[in-house]
Amino acid sequence: MGLSDGLSNPNKKAMVVEDCCSMIETQLASKSGLSGIALKTAFAALKGVKPGYISYAVEQLLPACFDALDPIWHEGEQQGDPVTHLSTNKSRTADALLSVTDNRLKSVKRAIVRGTYDKLRGSAKQHVEEAVPDFAQVIDRYTKA
């Protein structure tokens, strides 16, 4: 059973999406300096696309993200601690997640979404790596439920 299989329950899926959105908000709040300002501005622009856009985007991306993380998570399960394994392998984990968003953005037609992503993509890996431990905790919470 893969990570995305756990999303088949609509109630559970809604909770995972909500927790991921909260995690994103927390990660953004912790950013400072020029890169923090740029990220917060970009996030505000994406929120302005339409009400609920962020949660919609998270919901759409999660199944592919979980599919991309399945092999790494499974390795961690075999070692006895998938959360630590994802965190220890945060570069590989970030690459897997960014491959999903990179692929998804190829078909996005909204200029504001594509433009925002393109502007921030160069620094995205560092930010995703920083979020991996929190994301791993969210995944773990729902794989045990």
Image (cartoon, rainbow, N blue to C red):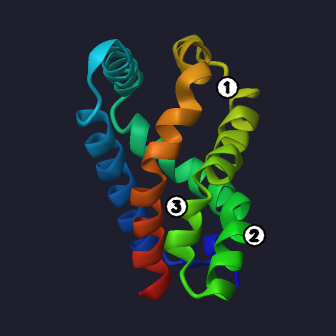
Q: Residue at x 39, y 77 (%)?
A: 141
Where is residue 57? Give x, y as percent. 51, 41
> What is the distance, in whole Å, between disc 2 and disc 3 at their CAs?
14 Å
Q: Which residue is mark 3?
A: 87
Quarter residue 20 falls in: bottom left
Circle 1 or circle 2, nearest the eye: 2
Above-or-below relation of 4 to 135: below
Circle 1 or circle 3, nearest the eye: 3
The residue closer to the viewer here, 17 or 65, is 65
Q: Residues within 10 Å of mark 2 (few under 14, many from 20)?
A: few
Nearest to N terminus: mark 2 or mark 3: 2
Q: Which residue is mark 2?
A: 71
Above-or-below relation of 35 to 132: above
Secondary structure under tag 3 reads helix
Secondary structure under tag 1 reads loop
Quarter residue 6 falls in: bottom right
- Residue type highlighted by circle 3: Ser
Q: Residue at x 47, y 35 (%)?
A: 127
> What is the distance, in whole Å, between disc 1 and disc 2 at their CAs?
27 Å
Asked if the residues shown at circle 2 and circle 3 are in contact, with their CB atoms under 8 angstroms apart, the answer is no
- The N terminus - image quarter: bottom right
Nearest to N terminus: mark 1 or mark 3: 3
From this viewpoint, is residue 117 visible?
no
Secondary structure under tag 2 reads helix
Q: Which residue is mark 1?
A: 108
Quarter residue 65 falls in: bottom right
The single residue placed furthest to the front in the displayed view is 88
